[in-house]
Structure formats: structure tokens, C-alpha cells
């Protein structure tokens, strides 16, 4: 599982980057000083941390001016540009420039987060699960404690709380974010400049292009007076040490061999199956005309991006050199654990417990995937509303984490935003999802049967079902003769 809330530093040096990502709260200060003669200070680390922002659409950016200007990659802002586009004005294709601040365009569903405070709450969370018999009970107790800590933190600080799990439960940190929801588009280049080379991501083509978008944060109707922002320079010099700061996913290095085998043999192949079929379906949908191509473009880019990323991961997991190295490392770790009775008693059964958990997850993967809705925005909105209605009847700490009091402001923003909904694309997504249900769960599965009742119509305009017409004659768009011809065609 990726934890996109982790704020980290990645260090690179010229063409030979150093390996690693580190928390702002725990960088290898002495090692960097020893290797490069640069001493990172707490003040510098805090400044960089508070100059970074996380995009709710996924990705990172930097505050780059005292009046709230934010710079990010064009591909990070692609979803925002698609939301602001129309048939008459395609901002992805044509680009955008605001000559003055009055011309800057509000982004309807965007939240930017700046990490402002970090607290180590490891002992509180871990102690909540101690003494309970089953892992499920311990997990529920820890989640309740996490929600309670978030609510208390929000009331105390006014910051948006997010309690993150680090090192797969080794540590728990409570992050407090400054939350910005009034964000406006300032500049984006044309797609031809931003995606030069014909590939919309960074997996296959080096980015020798204008891959940039600028936005501006507003507070109380005025540009943000940014206490922390990165200053512009003339670029990096030769032999200069360079740091990259942002909100990446986790490295997942603590996964066991059984984890990797599950990804290789079950999860990634199934995800890739869905991505490949959806990519082809969106390409077919895009052939329905210029407007179909425009409204499908952002989702198609995202699908292709995910497909290429997972294809690379699967290739790595099928590389015997990589898997043999992981097997060897795990053998050494097991030998260390089992060589001492105290360690063996505490951790010796961990691998078997993980293997059993992976087997359960594999058995339920199709069912979990089935209720995700296949990419329909309306389905996702409906699911969120139904679940919120149920969860809000409970105390915050007993709810699913995404419906806790701390999470509700973002949910309300998402459900109430003026993001465009395209009926044709929605119908295409639902049809794709229903086909997936039938292929993977079977035609007689209760969910497939119920889903069939929601199937969007595919019929030509002059077609009616084989039953008496319920539309008054004065309102019919078809003729009885047309209905009879349609019936003959469908019954042959």
C-alpha cells in the first residue's frame, strides 16, 4: 500500500544519485555532512518542508513566491485542466495564461496541503492494541486510537490531521497540514509543449519539454502571504549538491517474499487485466468524435500511466536476480530471528501469519475490486453518500477512517464541487464495470445480476423493448412500423 502522505527528502548528486528517501524529521545529517561537507540545519529542513505542497489529485508542488504562486508538473495538473475545459475551450490542448490575477481561474475540486507539524504518537497507537487476542481486534483498537488522536489534534491546532503508518507499523506519526482549497490556475502550456515526445508520463520518455503548470493559493480572497517559499535561482552548477523534496509513495522495502509473490502472481496481473481492457475501451470511446476524445483524454492518460508503471513492476518481480536477492535477504533475517529464543518467540511466526493474510486477500480480491465501481464518478459519489450516512451514525473513532470527523471536510468538498460529469463517459465506465463483473464473478453472481439492472442503454434512438409501448403516442419519437422492424431484427 502506498502512503502518499509521507513527506520525504530524496538526495541526488549529478549523474550518480545517492539512494534513499528520508523523513524531514529523520534525515541522515551526519552521513550527508561526511560525504559532501554540507550540514543540514533544522531551520533549513523546516523551510523546505513548509515550502512543499501535496495535490489532492496526486503529486507534489512547490510554493515559489511570497504571494502564493505554486509550481508543479503539467501532468500533475492534467486532471485540473481537464475539469476546467469544455468543448469550446480545451485547456489541455490549447494551454492557459492569466494576464492578471483577476483572470486566474478557480479550480473546483483541488486541495493543496502543506506539512506544518509532525508529532510522534507511536507509543499511544501501539499501546491501544496491546493485550487483545486477535490481530483483527488489535487493528480495530489502533484505528480507533488514530481517529481519536486526529480529532483531538484538529481541535487543538486547527490544522488538517493525518495519522500515517510508517515502516509498516514500526512508527506512527501525526501530520498536521495547512489546508488550502481556494486555488486558481495561472499558467499551463499547450500539450504539444508539455508532452513533447508523444508520451504523457515519465516512465518511457525523458522530459525535455515544458512540463510545468503554475497555480496560486488564496486565503480569505487574497493571495497567500507565504512565509515559506523557494526562491528562484539560475539553475544548479556542476558539482552542486541537489535535494528533491515532496510527497512520494513508500519504498515498500519491508515486504516479505510472500508479499512480492502475491503482487507478482495475483494482484498485479489482475490490475493489469483491468487497465488493459479499460485502455482499449477508452481508445474506442475516443473514436466517437472530437468531444469524446477530449472528455476521455485525462482518464486515458491516467490508465496508460498506471499500466506502464505496473508493467515495469511486474517485469522486476519476474526477474530471478531480484527475487533471489530478496529470498537471500529473508533467509538471513529468519536465521537472525530464530537464533535467539526471545526473538523467535516474539517474531518467529510472523512470516506464517503474513502468508495466511495474503491468501485471504487473494481470495477476496475480485470481490473487493467489484465494489469499486469501475471509474464511474456518479457511482463513487453514490457509494460515498451511502457509506457516509451509515458511518456518521457512529462515534468518529468507530467509523471507517475515511469518514472520521477529520476526513469529512475533504469529502464534503469533493461531493459538492462543480466538477463536470459527462453522461456518455459515465455510461461507458458503467458498461465496462458490468462486463468485468460478468467475466470475473460470473453471470449468476448476485452483484452481477443486480448490476445488470443498472446497465446503461445502448439501443439506437428508434429502438424499443419487446413490450407494449408506455409512451403516449403524441410523445413518441419512433413509429409503430419502426418498432415492428426492430422487433423482427432482434428475434431472428
Image (spheres, helix red, strand yellow):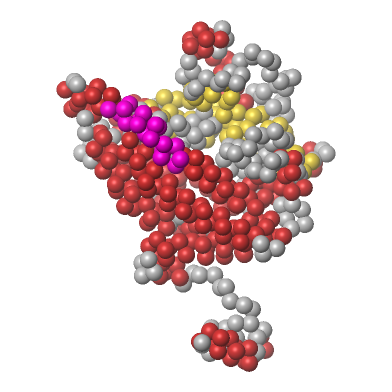
Quarter occupied by residue 484? bottom right
Q: Which residue appears farthest toward the left when viewing the image?
A: 341
* Residue 41 on image: x %, y %: 55, 12
Looking at the image, residue 63 lies above or below residue 403: above
Residue 327 on the magenta span? yes
User: In this orientation, which residue lies closer to the viewer: 199 or 57?
Assistant: 199
User: In this orientation, which residue lies closer to the viewer: 232 or 235?
Assistant: 235
Q: Main secondary structure of the magenta part?
A: helix
* Residue 205 on image: x %, y %: 63, 37
Residue at 52% in and 53% down: 276
Looking at the image, residue 235 lies above or below residue 419: above
User: In this orientation, which residue lies closer to the viewer: 174 or 314?
Assistant: 314
Residue at 56% in and 57% down: 280
Residue 461 on the magenta span? no
Instruction: Tell me if 194 is positioned left or right of 99 in this view.
Output: left
* Residue 183 on image: x %, y %: 67, 40
Residue at 51% in and 26% down: 8
Residue 55 appears in the figure: no
Looking at the image, residue 463 lies above or below residue 305: below
Looking at the image, residue 114 lies above or below residue 75: above
Instruction: Tell me if 221 is positioned left or right of 242 in this view.
Output: right
Q: Which residue appears farthest toward the front when viewing the image?
A: 320
- For the image, the number of numbered tags is 0
Quarter occupied by residue 333? top left
Quarter occupied by residue 350? top left
* Residue 424 on image: x %, y %: 62, 64
Residue at 49% in and 34% down: 249
Residue 21 appears in the figure: yes
Instruction: Tell me if 214 is positioned left or right of 342 in this view.
Output: right
Q: Quadrant of the N terminus?
A: top left
Q: Which residues are magenta?
A: 314-331
Amino acid at each position: 500500500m502506498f502512503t502518499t502522505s509521507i513527506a520525504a527528502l530524496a538526495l541526488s548528486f549529478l549523474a550518480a544519485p545517492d539512494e534513499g528517501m528520508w523523513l524531514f524529521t529523520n534525515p541522515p545529517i551526519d552521513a550527508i555532512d561526511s560525504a559532501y561537507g554540507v550540514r543540514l540545519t533544522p531551520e533549513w529542513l523546516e523551510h523546505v518542508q513548509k515550502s512543499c505542497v501535496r495535490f489532492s489529485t496526486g503529486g507534489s508542488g512547490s510554493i515559489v513566491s511570497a504571494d502564493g504562486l505554486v509550481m508543479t508538473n503539467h501532468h500533475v495538473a492534467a486532471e485540473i485542466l481537464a475539469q476546467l475545459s469544455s468543448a469550446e475551450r480545451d485547456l489541455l490542448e490549447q494551454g492557459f495564461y492569466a494576464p492578471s490575477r483577476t483572470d486566474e481561474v478557480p479550480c473546483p475540486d483541488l486541495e493543496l496541503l502543506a506539512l506544518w507539524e509532525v508529532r510522534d504518537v507511536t507509543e499511544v497507537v501501539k499501546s491501544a492494541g496491546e493485550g487483545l487476542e486477535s490481530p483483527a481486534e488489535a487493528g480495530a483498537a489502533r484505528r480507533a486510537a488514530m481517529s481519536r488522536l486526529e480529532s483531538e489534534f484538529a481541535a487543538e491546532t486547527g490544522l488538517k490531521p493525518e495519522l500515517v503508518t510508517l515502516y509498516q507499523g514500526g512508527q506512527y506519526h501525526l501530520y498536521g497540514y495547512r489546508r488550502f482549497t481556494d486555488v486558481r490556475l495561472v499558467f499551463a502550456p499547450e500539450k504539444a509543449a508539455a508532452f513533447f515526445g508523444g508520451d504523457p508520463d515519465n516512465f518511457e520518455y525523458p522530459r525535455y519539454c515544458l512540463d510545468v503548470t503554475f497555480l496560486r493559493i488564496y486565503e480569505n480572497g487574497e493571495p497567500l502571504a507565504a512565509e515559506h517559499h523557494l526562491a528562484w535561482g539560475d539553475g544548479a552548477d556542476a558539482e552542486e549538491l541537489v535535494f528533491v523534496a515532496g510527497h512520494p509513495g513508500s519504498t515498500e522495502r519491508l515486504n516479505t517474499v510472500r508479499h512480492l509473490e502475491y503482487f507478482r502472481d495475483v494482484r498485479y496481473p489482475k490490475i493489469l487485466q483491468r487497465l488493459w481492457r479499460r485502455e482499449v475501451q477508452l481508445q474506442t470511446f475516443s473514436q466517437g468524435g472530437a468531444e469524446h476524445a477530449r472528455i476521455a483524454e485525462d482518464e486515458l492518460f491516467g490508465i496508460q500511466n498506471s499500466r506502464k508503471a505496473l508493467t515495469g513492476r511486474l517485469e522486476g518481480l519476474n526477474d530471478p536476480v531480484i527475487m533471489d536477492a530478496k529470498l537471500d535477504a529473508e533467509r538471513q533475517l529468519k536465521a537472525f530471528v530464530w537464533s535467539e529464543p526471545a526473538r523467535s518467540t516474539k517474531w518467529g511466526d510472523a512470516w506464517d501469519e503474513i502468508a495466511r493474510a495474503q491468501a485471504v486477500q487473494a481470495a477476496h480480491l475480485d470481490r473487493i475490486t467489484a465494489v469499486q465501481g469501475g471509474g464511474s464518478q456518479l457511482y463513487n459519489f453514490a457509494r460515498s453518500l451511502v457509506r457516509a450516512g451509515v458511518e456518521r451514525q457512529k462515534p468518529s473513532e468507530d467509523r471507517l477512517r475515511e469518514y472520521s470527523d477529520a476526513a469529512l471536510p475533504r469529502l464534503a468538498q469533493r461531493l459538492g464541487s462543480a466538477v463536470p460529469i459527462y453522461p456518455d463517459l459515465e455510461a461507458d465506465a458503467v458498461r465496462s464495470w458490468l462486463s468485468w463483473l460478468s467475466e470475473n464473478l460470473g453471470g449468476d453472481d448476485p452483484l452481477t445480476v443486480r448490476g445488470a439492472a443498472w446497465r446503461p442503454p445502448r439501443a439506437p434512438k428508434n429502438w424499443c423493448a419487446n413490450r407494449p409501448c408506455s409512451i403516449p403516442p403524441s410523445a413518441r419519437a419512433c413509429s409503430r412500423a419502426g418498432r415492428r422492424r426492430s422487433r423482427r431484427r432482434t428475434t431472428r
